[in-house]
Amino acid sequence: MSLSAERKQYLEDLCKRFRIELVELLYKIQTGHPGGSLSATEIITTLYFEILNVDAKNAKCEDRDRFILAKGHAAPMLYFVLAEKGFFPKEDLETLRQLNSHLQGHPCATKTRGVELSTGPLGLGLPAGLGMALGAKLNQKDFYTYVLLGDGEIQEGIVWEAAMSAAKFKADNLIAILDNNNVQLDGTVDEIMPMGDIGAKWKAFGWNVIHIDGHNVEEIYDAIQQAKAVKGMPTIIIAKTVKGKGVSFMEGKNVWHGKPIGDEDYKKAMVELGGTING
């Protein structure tokens, strides 16, 4: 079944609002990671509002789907989504990256409701997600585990060790999504460590591979339905995205990985996003 026109519009409206609220917040607190958060907006939003079986009122339900934000620097967007879903009050977002806040720069599973795994050091997400997926099979549970990876992250050897294991153990309840914006902290992927044909690499490691536009909520939804229909092997969805998506001067620029947003940049961003300039 495809995404209805009504749900498509709902998701797109949510993404537009999240982008505005995220830029507003990061400007206000003068910290955080705008580039990777804006890149992953449609992916995280579609997962939580259309795919995942999660309930803020029963956050530790054994049968819930698991989502791991392996590219932990995109935590601000995850926090906006979790707050909207009711895992914690929206007012808490104002405390992002402040001392004693439960909302730190990278997700912390022991402090933030709804976060399944603390992430920060690159490469931890996929092996941990594989463990969750295999645990589900051992316990005869039918939930899925989703892992959102970043470009720089798949340069880590541990990711490929997990990829081999996932294929060996036929983890068809594990779905990885690559936020493929081709930009990392210090430059483009080609400048830092060219990855060649990424799809061919995953296929060679025994994975089902799907390519999509990572800013198209319909394609994200359809790809996940296709992935769930594949049996006997894990799936990776290579989602082509743009770092800093929605703000022209941030798009494709590695400097916006974690740069504070200045006064003039904030005003320009609000105009482009259709938000209101405050202050």
Image: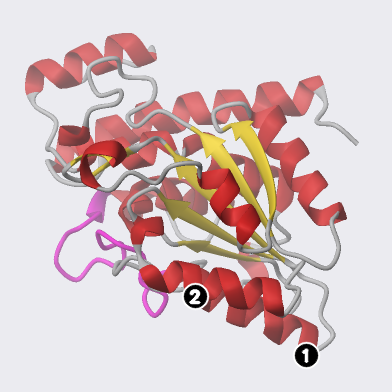
The question of residue 81 being in magenta is answered with: no
Decide if residue 250 is in sight here. yes
| Residue at the image point whose x is 75% and y is 29% from the top | 7
- Callout 2 secondary element: helix
Q: Separation of disc 2 and disc 1 at Cα? A: 21 Å
**Camera-side residue: 88 or 247?**
247
Decide if residue 113 is in sight here. no
Numbered mark located on residue 18 in the image: none
From this view, report whether residue 232 is shown above or below residue 250: below
**Residue pushed farthest left?**
263
**Residue pushed farthest right?**
1
| Residue at the image point whose x is 28% and y is 31% from the top | 23
Numbered mark located on residue 161 in the image: 2
| Residue at the image point whose x is 52% and y is 66% from the top | 114
Residue 135, given in percent of the width and then of the height, sits at 69, 86
Residue 2, given in percent of the width and then of the height, sits at 85, 32
Q: Which residues are magenta?
A: 94-112
Magenta segment, prevailing SS (helix, strand or loop): loop
Tell me where residue 140 sits by quadrant.
bottom right
Residue 136, given in percent of the width and then of the height, sits at 74, 82
Q: Amino acid at mark 1?
A: Leu
Residue to which mark 1 is pinned: 138
Residue 150, given in percent of the width and then of the height, sits at 40, 50
In this rendering, position of residue 142 left or right of residue 82: right
Q: Amino acid at mark 2?
A: Glu
